[in-house]
Amino acid sequence: MGGSSRASVRPALLTFRYGPADLRRAYKLGAAAASRGAGETVAIVDASYPARGRIATSLFSIACADDPGFRTANGTVLEMWSCNGGSNQRWTMASDGTLRVLGKCMDVRHSGAANGTLVDLWSCNGTGAQQWRHSIEADTLMNPQSGACLNGVAFRKANGTKLDIFECDTSTDTAFWHVPAGPILSGVGGKCLDDPGFRTANGTRAGIWSCNGGSNQRWSAAGDGTIKVLGKCLDVYRSGTASGTPVDLWSCSGTGRQQWEVGPGEELIDSASGKCLDLPRNAAVNGTRLVLGKCTEAAGESWLGG
């Protein structure tokens, strides 16, 4: 993400899940389940540590929202396709509520609201046709302007099925879209943003640890700019703004001390202070605690996905 992008997270696969309803419920998203309510969206997913919920067993088939042929022309109709890790399936949820791929936004054609209205790509323009809200509870992606949910045309599941909106009905398999939580990787090789010891007490200092795929390294980000793990938000201690201010976990409060943006160099920037989430001295030692620091494009201020 370059330029002045305000996307809250790096790209990740937007996967569609289908299978028997009882099994689907049994495989509800694990690590991110503590993040409640509509608007909860994807964190950074690294292919080395597959996110829980990307179910790839014989019990389920998985398809992804796909930009067919890597096209970027306005009006390209999105399709459902077997997940393959291509850049045309790697989506970013921006803090403005849009879903983006290859520089374009997921869009309800002509701002339609009727069942069966196609979903396409269009230049990002901030309109209601490009707003999406993911519900972890229901595993749906809803367009608030229309009140309808992303779906496969005629509820089909085959490769090449076009995407449309349809009234939100969780009894249909094709209404379920799974946006898994995942690790946030430090620019210092092999290290991940970490909740040490799986602690959930307010004031727990955020740190780094060797990437291991644990639930304490599986972060989810919401369209409101917060980043969450195990039900707590990444937080600037006591709303400090000075370099060296500790970064901790705290009950989510919606305050500015819990708002983060992505900078042009993959920094995570505290919205209130303009300072970066910083790994002091680019230390690669497990357990090193994170602080706010002046943004310098150092490796210890780069946070990215695989």
Image (cartoon, grey):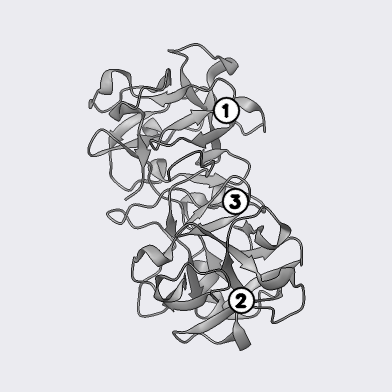
> Callout 2, which amino acid?
Asn
Residue at image location 51% in from the left, 50% down from the top: 32
Q: Residues within 10 Å of mark 1 (few under 14, many from 20)?
A: some
Q: CA distance from mark 2 to mark 1?
A: 35 Å
Relative to 108, say whether 214 is above or below. above
Q: Which residue is mark 1?
A: 271
Residue at image location 63% in from the left, 80% down from the top: 172
Q: CA distance from mark 1 to mark 3?
A: 19 Å
Q: Quadrant of residue 61?
A: bottom left
Q: Quadrant of residue 102?
A: bottom left
Which numbered disc flags the more N-terminal residue, 1 or 3? Answer: 3
Which numbered disc flags the more N-terminal residue, 3 or 2? Answer: 3
Quick one: 2 or 232, which is closer to the camera? Answer: 2
Q: Which residue is mark 2?
A: 151
> Callout 3, which amino acid?
Glu
Mark 2 vs mark 1: give the one in front: 1
Q: Quadrant of residue 133?
A: bottom right
